[in-house]
Amino acid sequence: MRILVTFAVQTEFAPWRKMRGFKRISTVPFELYDAVVGTHTVRVLLTGIGWECAKRTANPAMNDVFDACISSGLSGGLKAEYHAGDILAFRAVGELNGERAFSSSEWLVRQASAKGIKTAEKLITSNRLVVTAEEKHRIGSFGDAVDMESFRILAAAQGRGIPTLAVRAISDTVDEDLPMDFSQHISENGQIAAGRVFGQLFFSPQVIPAMVRFGSRTRQVAEQLTDFLDSFVSTLVPQPLADSKEVATR
C-alpha cells in the first residue's frame, strides 16, 4: 500500500522521522518525506499550521496515487474525559461554526481501534488557534477535540476517492490555557517562528516555566503518537473489497 500521512509541523513528525529514517524528497513548495514502514510505502506531508496552509499543500500533494490518507498530529481536548497523551481516532471531522463534515473510512477506524486507542465521534477544525480553556468549554458541544488542518486534508483526500482517517493526540486538555498564543508567531510557511517566540519570552519571562512544561509534554505526546502510528501503519491491512464497493456507490 501507498499511504500518505500528514503533520502540521516538524516537531510532531520528528520522532517518527528519526525512528524510520524518512528521506526528504521535497522542500518547495512544501516538505515531503518517504520511508518504508512494514510492507507499505509511506509519504509524509508537512502541511504547516492552519486551515489555509492545509488547503494549499494537501491538494497538490495528493496528485500522486495513495491507498489511504491519515491526518495526524496534536490537538486540544474539548471533553473532560480526554487527558494529555490520549490518542483518538475520529469517526468524522467537521468545521467549527459550519455544517460540513467528512467521515473517516470505517475500515481504518476499525483497525485503529483494534490497536487499543480511543474512538471519538468528531474532530473540529478551527480556522484560528483555540487558546483558552474558556473557549474550549464553549465549543465542546460541537466535538471531542480541535485542530486546525484535518478538515481541509480530508476534503482533499475524499475529493480524490482516497480513504481517510483522522488521528490526533491530545496535547492540552479542555481545562488548560495554552501558555502562549502561538498564532502570533507563525511564519508564512505555517511553521512556528522560534525567534518570535524567544522574543516574547524575553519580554515576558514569567511565561517561561509554563512554556518549558508544555514543550516537554508535547515532545512526550509526539513520541506516544509515533509509537501508535508506526505500529498501526506497519500492520495496516488493505481496504476490504466490500468497503471499496460501498464507497464507490456513494
Image (cartoon, helix red, strand yellow):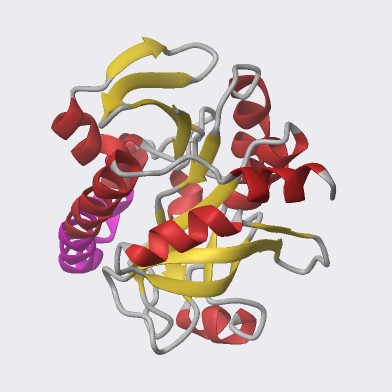
Residue range in magenta is 200-219
Please say if 25 is above or below 5: above
Would residue 113 appear left or right of 109 to someone viewing this image?
Answer: left
Q: Is residue 212 within the magenta segment?
A: yes
Would residue 159 appear left or right of 188 to someone viewing this image?
Answer: right
Please say if 171 is above or below 20: below
Residue 75 on image: x %, y %: 44, 62
Please say if 203 is above or below 238: below
The quadrant in which residue 33 appears is top left
Residue 89 on image: x %, y %: 46, 63
The residue positioned 37% from the left and 80% from the top of the image is 176
| Residue situated in front as seen by the camera: 37 or 206 | 37
Count of numbered tags = 0
For the N terminus, the image quarter is top left
Residue 48 on image: x %, y %: 49, 36
Instruction: Give the main secondary structure of the magenta stretch.
Output: helix
The residue positioned 72% from the left and 36% from the top of the image is 161
| Residue situated in front as seen by the camera: 27 or 205 | 27
